[in-house]
Image (cartoon, rainbow, N blue to C red):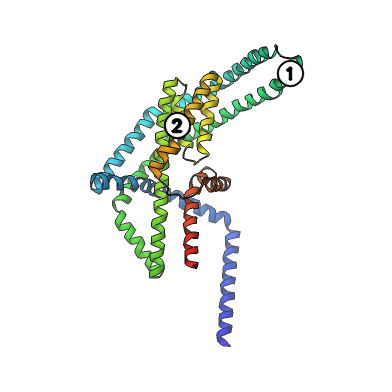
Amino acid sequence: MIKDNKKFIEKYAIVLIGLLILGFVYINTASISNGFSKIFGILKPFFIAFFIAYIFNSIIVFLKERFKLKNGMAILIVYSVFILIMVIMIVIGIPIVVKSIVQIINETPNHADDMIEFVQNNVLNFAKNIDINILNEIEKYVDNNFIGNLQKISKGINYFLNSFLVFITNIGSAVVTISFSLIISIYMLIEKKSLKSLGCRILKKILKEDKSIKFIEFSKKANVIFSKFLTGLIVQASILGTLCFIGFLILKVKYALLLSVIIACTNVIPYIGPFIGATPAVLVTLFYAPMKALWVCVLILILQQVDANIVGPKIMGNYIGLSPFWIIFTISIGGGFFGIMGMIFSVPIAAIIKIIFSEIVELDK
């Protein structure tokens, strides 16, 4: 009887403590939120460093296995190439991109007016040879729909490019943080084995032996998915952006570097990203050269097919294991709740959830 009362009291005591904690959190939400923000601000370089080290680790492991390099030499090569690329981007790339954005923002209204004049002069002149009723309908459509939509598109492009300009300038202001994070990430990669060993020891202290082994095995599978997915996306985006830039130079497309950067950045979003990136390129070209815009569209479609059917499978393989339907579904859910970052990371997270469910089903058998 005493034991039963003791258990009863312990259960209600736990519930009461839990409610008190929730009440405290609810009353002090602002203070707790500010505290977490401050902690995140302090640890932000370490989070960025971990992400950089995680991305570079796959490349370093590849160099060590393929060319039999020592860990220090592989790290030196990877970081030297990365710093060289960053310097080129800061010194050459970013000024060109910013200049292109400013030019497009200034010229878009004029291009929109030229497009409206082109439609009015050519489409309506062509329509004069058609039945008068059809002519009236075409005039109404052009006046009420096409011109209004074209002006909306013009404003939309300006808004998008203004946002992209702010993003580029923010990158410039974050150089100090990124530089500090790079240094931390180097030490993380140098001490990778000792950090992993420390993590395993802590895990074994928290969990039982069999559960810790299962968790480590699961972590290895999740690591393969995340590392292959993220590294593959970056390599794919770089290849596609470079091919687009070369193609735009051949076609003599204006703002070739800017449009290629946009396509490369949006390509990290699976399935939907290529369409998002192609839209600004086609629309911007459409304003000053309608026929060239068609060739831009054809070029992007060809490169996307090469990327999806040749480059992607070679780089990433079939590590995700999700059908296109589930990929689009998870992207929609991730994007709806967490925006762009949700769209990018929803796919590997969904693949990991699939592994968890598969192992649960296996355990039930």
- Residue plotted at (56% across, 47% down): 329
Q: Amino acid at mark 2?
A: Leu
Name the one closer to the observer, 233 or 358: 358
Q: Position of residue 163 (x, y in %)?
A: 53, 33
Question: What distance separates the C-alpha of mark 2 from that of mark 1?
Answer: 40 Å
Closer to the chain start, of discs 2 and 1, is 1
Which residue: 56% across, 77% down? 10
Q: How many marks?
A: 2
**x, y percent for residue 243:** 41, 30
Whether residue 352 is situated above or below residue 107 in the rendered picture: below
Which residue has dot 1 on it? 134
Task: Check disc 2 and report the residue beneath it.
Answer: 303
Q: Is residue 237 left or right of residue 33?
A: left
Q: Is residue 356 above or below residue 48?
A: below
Q: Which secondary structure lies at badge 1?
A: helix
Query: Does the rendering let one see residue 356?
Result: yes
Q: Residue at x 34, y 47 (%)?
A: 58
- Tell me, for residue 328, which label it has, or none: none
Quadrant placement of the N terminus? bottom right
Q: Secondary structure at mark 2?
A: helix
Please state the horizontal and vertical placement of residue 140, each as a whole percent of the image: 73, 20
* Percent position of residue 116, x then y: 63, 18
